[in-house]
Amino acid sequence: MTLASPAHPAPRQRFWRSRAFRRFSRNRLALIGLVMIFVLTLACFFGPYLLPFDELYIDLRARFAPPGTGAHIFGTDPLGRDIAARLFVAGQTSLIVGFAAMLISTVIGVLIGVIAGYSGGRLGASLMRLVDAFLSFPAIFLLLTLAAFVSPSAMMITLIIALTSWMEVARIVEAEIRSYRDRDFVMAARMLGLSRSHIMFRELLPNVMGPIMVAATLTVARAILMEAYISFLGYGIQPPLPSWGNMLNGAQQYLASAPWLAIVPGVAITLAVTGFNFIGDGLRDALDARADHRA
């Protein structure tokens, strides 16, 4: 007699996953978000190769050119640099920071959440009190405090955002693991003599991947917004390396005379954050197993 591990989905689980995929594909907002992120990613990573200017090219004769002037599709900035080229390169920076911060914060949150949820007792309580201690500080103040004492490189900003974003993932994972740790398949795994690490990461963790995927998607949007915020305040990524946040920082004094300097990166941030939020909401609805019972 063999025991089926939840890490290896049975036909019923594969059927549930196919139902989840169909629910996601019928969610119009989720599909719109997916298209938005796909187009934005293509534009940021391939768009610079289609432009006649790079992000550092200066043409003082073309200062403050409005959108649609010659080859400057989004206009130019106070130094005559092409805004489209800077926008796309800035998008690479912001998206990479967002995804990298998401990966780091998700790994930290999952590790702490799994250990706290499965262990329980004093260890679990201590880890969750650590999470509560981090959550007691306003995230933006903690972020700005850390950013003020480190070199404002893209790597350091990524690490700072990750270190201030893992707590929500930890709480979600801890609650999910705690709800599974006394199930029959976990008791059977203990009786078979499987190690704690095997049970936590091979038996329990695959059952909570849905909430983790949703949290990770929303964390990308939050990381992009946080990077833009601290760069706008001057503590984040510094020129000449462009990011959407420091493009907004340089545009604030020209809002009346050259509003496109702020509108273009502002729209890019809005599209990125909205797209990831749409995808996260779609995943949350699609991976909700209770939807099958409500249908």
Image (spheres, rainbow, N blue to C red):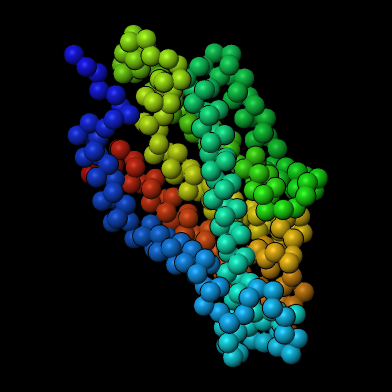
Viewer-proximal residue, 289 or 98?
98
Where is residue 224 drawn, in percent x and y? 59, 55
In the image, taking residue 165 as reference, residue 190 lies left or right, namely left
Snapshot quadrant of residue 127: top right
Where is residue 290 drawn, in percent x and y? 30, 37
Q: Is residue 74 above or below residue 207?
A: below
Viewer-proximal residue, 93 or 218?
93
Viewer-proximal residue, 119 or 86?
86
In the image, taking residue 49 as reference, residue 27 lies left or right, namely left
Q: Is residue 118 above or below residue 73?
A: above
Q: Residue drawn 53% across and 22% down?
A: 116
Viewer-proximal residue, 288 or 204?
204
Quadrant where the C terminus lies? top left
Q: Residue drawn 64% across and 26% down?
A: 130
Q: Residue drawn 60% across and 74% down?
A: 85
Where is residue 253 drawn, in percent x and y? 77, 74
Q: Does residue 256 appear in this view?
A: no
Q: Is residue 3 above or below residue 261?
A: above
Quadrant where the N terminus lies? top left
In the image, taking residue 14 as reference, residue 242 lies left or right, namely right
Q: Does residue 144 appear in this view?
A: yes
Numbered-mark total: 0
Where is residue 186 drawn, in percent x and y? 35, 17
Q: Residue drawn 55% across and 64% down?
A: 270
Q: Is residue 179 above or below residue 262?
A: above
